Image: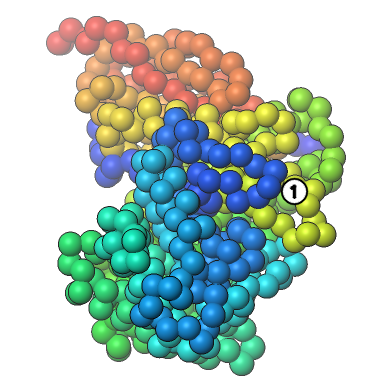
């Protein structure tokens, strides 16, 4: 196999390009959903997760609208018709973990959930007037004390999960998707008018796809945006999911940019862009092939560490490439999911708190590191990596407390690198304090003089690299 070309990264600390966004959202609440899991409230707080999205991974007809409003013939204005106790545990746990809630208004009411393979799906809402009334009262329960509820616990509400698949808007129901989404947005607008002190932001439509599928989804997306514009509907947050055959960090970056361009072209520049469900699984299936962990497989500690590093490096690479385009995201998943009764052996796809071995994963440790880096509110600086293979990703950061950069190599190949740094002002010496996630750490002396410095090295496969600059005295004036 021919050696891959080195990666050249130029970081110009003179030019800030906007704030760095940690994007530390996750799928799942701090309370366990699966019998083989545990409570993670303290872990959510310790690892400083900021946003949690639920409840799609629960048992059927428990936490979803199908369980909260179990009788489709019930009176939606009567608190007695609701079963809030189960979902309330998750809402309260998120509050205790200092984590904002992205509540999914999934699926239809009336005990209509059903397993679709290993995933919990549901029926598209049959009676949108009833469904919207139920959604409104759920928000009033979470935020306004209705039915012995709470004070402002939910800030974001998302439309039916993956509506054109698990959400039931398939086949003959597909034509109802756009009008129902518009009605959902109108419902949230009406809620906000009636409750100006506890506004929520609508999120959707959350369609899953990968970059190679964009040609198929571009026209339907354009039509949906045209309908929103025609109807005068307000969409604060447009959501998508990245799943499929082409989900490399570079492909995910292209997909996000395509959505951003479509929104801007339709006069929706103020609409934020969120990826509300994504994970490393599809990418690693292509990268690792048969080396990927399989259900029930016992892995060596070395193999576990390699897989964990690959997951973390992939997550970091995507977050680096989404900067300035995607405003937030929810990694799938933080906690174990429920599975159908015939599939109780947990899959080994890695999340934040459920590795094949012991918790927490390197992905959780990476979240903590990113939180520490963002405490100083860093700005992104001009960073260019060549050649761009869609894998290796880099980002320079600066703040009043110092400067540094992040480099990720999620691929299975080691890469040589050259980092060229343009500082804001000349220094006499430049030392680098570096740390490989789950690996070694140390210091290195950069080569150069004045304001131009460089550092050469080897970037192992499946590696997240965190580097801080330790400048010596400023160089004397000429």
Instruction: Find residue 368 and report its horizontal and vertical position in percent.
Output: 45, 30
Left/right of residue 131 with respect to residue 303 in the rendered view:
left
Mark 1 crowd level (few <14, some 14–19, many ≥20, 10 Å Cα): some
Q: Is residue 341 visible?
A: yes
Residue placed furthest toward the left: 477
Task: Decide which of 426, 119 is in the foreground and name it.
Answer: 119
Q: Which residue is drawn at the image coordinates 31% and 30% (left, top)?
A: 375
**Residue bearing mark 1:** 347
Task: Decide which of 295, 34 is in the foreground and name it.
Answer: 34
Q: How many marks?
A: 1
Q: Is residue 329 visible?
A: no
In what quadrant of the picture does the C terminus appear? top left
Q: Which residue is drawn at the image coordinates 53% and 51% (left, top)?
A: 28
Dot 1: what SS?
loop
Instruction: Find residue 98 and report its horizontal and vertical position in percent.
Output: 36, 41
Instruction: Place residue 382 in its image quadrant.
Output: top left
Instruction: Find residue 352 and report its horizontal and vertical position in percent.
Output: 57, 39
Q: Is residue 414 above or below residue 71?
A: above
Q: Is residue 334 above or below residue 398?
A: below
Left/right of residue 43 with respect to residue 149 in the rendered view:
right
Task: Decide which of 49, 115 is in the foreground and name it.
Answer: 115
Left/right of residue 31 with respect to residue 354 in the rendered view:
left
Q: Which residue is drawn at the image coordinates 62% and 84% (left, top)?
A: 170
Instruction: Place residue 458 in its image quadrant.
Output: top right
Q: Which residue is drawn at the image coordinates 68% and 72% (left, top)?
A: 114
Instruction: Find residue 172 and report its horizontal and vertical position in percent.
Output: 61, 92
């Amino acid at each position: 196999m021919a050696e891959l070309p080195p990666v050249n990264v130029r970081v110009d600390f003179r030019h800030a390009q906007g704030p760095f966004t940690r994007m530390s959202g996750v799928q799942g609440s701090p309370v366990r959903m699966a019998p083989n899991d545990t409570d993670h409230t303290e872990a959510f707080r310790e690892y400083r997760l900021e946003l949690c999205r639920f409840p799609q991974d629960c048992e059927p007809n428990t936490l979803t609208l199908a369980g909260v409003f179990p009788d489709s013939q019930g009176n939606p204005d009567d608190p007695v018709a609701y079963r809030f106790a189960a979902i309330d545990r998750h809402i309260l746990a998120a509050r205790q973990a200092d984590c904002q809630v992205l509540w999914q208004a999934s699926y239809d009411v009336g005990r209509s959930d059903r397993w679709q393979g290993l995933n919990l799906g549901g029926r598209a809402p049959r009676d949108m007037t009833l469904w919207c009334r139920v959604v409104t009262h759920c928000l009033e329960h979470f935020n306004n004390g209705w039915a012995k509820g709470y004070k402002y616990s939910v800030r974001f509400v998302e439309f039916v999960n993956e509506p054109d698949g698990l959400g039931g808007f398939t086949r003959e129901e597909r034509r109802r998707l756009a009008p129902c989404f518009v009605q959902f947005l109108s419902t949230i607008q009406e809620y906000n008018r009636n409750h100006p002190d506890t506004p929520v932001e609508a999120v959707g439509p959350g369609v899953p796809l990968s970059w190679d599928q964009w040609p198929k989804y571009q026209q339907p997306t354009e039509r949906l945006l045209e309908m929103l514009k025609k109807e005068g509907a307000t969409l604060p947050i447009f959501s998508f999911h990245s799943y499929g055959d082409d989900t490399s960090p570079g492909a995910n970056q292209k997909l996000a940019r395509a959505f951003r361009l479509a929104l801007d072209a339709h006069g929706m520049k103020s609409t934020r862009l969120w990826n509300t469900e994504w994970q490393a699984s599809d990418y690693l299936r292509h990268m690792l092939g048969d080396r990927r962990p399989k259900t029930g497989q016992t892995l060596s500690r070395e193999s576990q560490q390699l897989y964990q590093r690959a997951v973390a490096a992939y997550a970091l690479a995507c977050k680096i490439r989404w900067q300035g385009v995607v405003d937030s995201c929810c990694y799938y998943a933080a906690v174990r999911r429920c599975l159908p009764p015939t599939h109780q052996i947990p899959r080994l796809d890695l999340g934040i708190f459920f590795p094949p071995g012991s918790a927490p994963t390197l992905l959780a440790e990476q979240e903590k590191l990113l939180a520490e880096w963002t405490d100083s509110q860093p700005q992104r600086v001009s960073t260019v990596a060549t050649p761009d293979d869609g894998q290796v990703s880099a980002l320079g950061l600066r703040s009043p407390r110092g400067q540094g950069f992040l480099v990720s190599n999620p691929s299975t190949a080691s890469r040589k690198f050259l980092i060229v740094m343009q500082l804001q002002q000349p220094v006499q010496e430049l030392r680098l304090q570096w740390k490989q996630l789950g690996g070694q750490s140390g210091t290195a002396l950069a080569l150069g003089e004045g304001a131009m410095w460089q550092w050469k090295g080897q970037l192992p496969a499946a590696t997240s690299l965190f580097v801080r600059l330790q400048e010596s005295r400023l160089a004397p004036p000429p």
